Amino acid sequence: MNLRKLNFLKKMTTAKKNTKKNTKTTTTKMTTTTKASSPRDFIEAENNSQQVVIWSKSYCPYCKATKQLFNSMKGVEVVVHELDNMKDGAMIQQELLHLTGQRSVPNVFVQGRHVGGNDDTQAAHQNGRLQDLLLMEYTPAKLAAM
Ligand SMILES: N[C@@H](CCC(=O)N[C@@H](CS)C(=O)NCC(=O)O)C(=O)O
């Protein structure tokens, strides 16, 4: 194992410990406008910079269940984009379909990784994958930049 990889694994262990101690409360942000140059840029910027992003619709019961799940988790920062309240919402939904193969909402990303809809997210919570993703300090984008 090379030194870089070893250092990365050490950092990851520390990150896991720190994350467990973290008691930051969950924040939910509603966004109604986009400043990015294209829907795709906006989606990628959000997914790659936030711990959890839920592409949602305000009236959707499946979205509500997903938001409740993340709101029940301490120390997890969640950003919710209600597509039905956004000027570019339809274009963003179309772009999400291109990116993920999924048209329905919620469309959930954790640490830049696509998790899926509400069913997928609840299942990931049950089988532990969601917790693994939430604890992943070093995302693919960060690793590529190392
Ligand atoms: N099985 C899906 C169901 C999601 C679903 O049916 N969402 C509806 C909104 S409640 C949807 O996206 N409909 C199409 C649309 O709004 O464009 C899940 O678990 O996420």
Image (tube, rainbow, N blue to C red):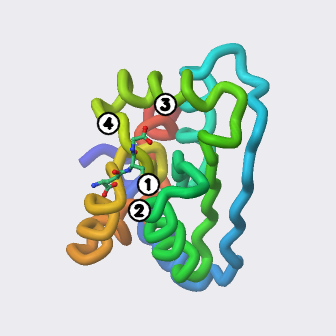
Asked if labels 1 and 3 touch by Cβ distance under 8 angstroms, the answer is no
Q: Tell me which amino acid carries mark 1.
A: Asn
SS for callout 4: loop
Of pointers 3 and 1, the one earlier in the residue sequence? 1
| Residue drawn at point x = 50 percent, y = 79 percent | 17
Asked if labels 4 and 2 touch by Cβ distance under 8 angstroms, the answer is no
The residue where tag 4 is placed is: 102
State which mark lies toward you, 2 or 1.
Answer: 2
Q: Quadrant of residue 9?
A: bottom left
Q: Is mark 2 within 8 Å of ligand 1?
A: yes
Badge 1 density bin: few <14, some 14–19, many ≥20, Cα 10 Å: few
Q: Where is residue 27? Give x, y as percent.
A: 71, 67
Q: Tell me which amino acid carries mark 3.
A: Gln
Distance of label 2 from label 1 (alpha carbons): 41 Å
The residue where tag 2 is placed is: 62
SS for callout 3: helix
| Residue drawn at point x = 37 percent, y = 42 percent | 104
The residue where tag 1 is placed is: 7
Q: Is residue 72 above or below residue 144?
A: below
Q: Is mark 1 within 8 Å of ligand 1?
A: no
Q: Tell me which amino acid carries mark 4.
A: Gln
